[in-house]
Image (spheres, rainbow, N blue to C red):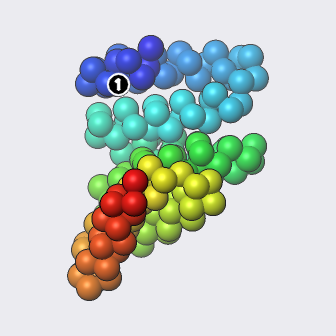
Amino acid sequence: MGDAYYLRGRMITAHDRFQCCLELCGAHGFGRIEVANLYMRGTTNLYQNNLDAALADCNASAEAAVRIGHLRAEMVARGGVLVYVLMEMDRIAEAEKQAVRALAIARQLGARRFEPFSLLNLSKIMILEDRRAEAVKTLRDRFALQEMK
């Protein structure tokens, strides 16, 4: 239900549904499901401008994913949400570390959809750091991957 409300743009309701899901997962020991829904609660926190809560959720999700060996959840927590939270908080160097890790996981998993996404995140970070030439090269790499599909 959280995903359905999220896709409709109903962030407060989605947040509540993800919270209920997390409580059920915790009560029944569904760790892999909990990890994936924790970064989604972080996403709804981000959209509600609750940056500290979003940061806590995404960090906890990434750390839990590492503990249980859930690479896809770690990749999305870091590259799909945490990068944006850190950029919003003007913690650009930390965002870059997360983007680099997400890219490495995407390549390890062969997640062709996430690799260009990670490269796009890295290029945004490079632009924020005034590393324009690197950003252009990274974007070219991203578009080359898109053309291979």
Total residue callouts: 1
Mark 1 closeness class: few <14, some 14–19, many ≥20 residues within 10 Å? many
| Rendered view: 104 above or below 3 | below
Q: Secondary structure at mark 1?
A: helix
Which of 112/92 is in front?
112
Residue name at image x 27 percent, y 20 percent: 8
Judged left or right of residue 41, residue 133 is left
Which of 32/91 is in front?
32
Residue name at image x 58 percent, y 23 percent: 22
Instruction: Answer whether residue 10 is visible to the viewer in this image.
Output: yes
Q: Amino acid at mark 1?
A: Tyr
Residue name at image x 69 percent, y 51 percent: 66
| The image quarter in which residue 108 lies | bottom right
Question: Could you tell me residue 87's position as x and y percent?
Answer: 33, 60
- Can you identify the residue that label 1 sits on? 6
Q: Quadrant of the N terminus?
A: top left
Judged left or right of residue 62, residue 115 is left
Residue name at image x 25 percent, y 72 percent: 128
Which of 29/50 is in front?
29
Q: Given the current orientation, which residue lies at the most extreme front position?
A: 148
Judged left or right of residue 50, residue 107 is right
Instruction: Answer whether residue 62 is visible to the viewer in this image.
Output: no
Question: Could you tell me residue 142's position as x and y percent?
Answer: 35, 65
Question: Could you tell me residue 91's position as x and y percent?
Answer: 37, 65
Question: Could you tell me residue 23's position as x and y percent?
Answer: 61, 19
Judged left or right of residue 67, residue 130 is left
Q: Quadrant of the C terminus?
A: bottom left
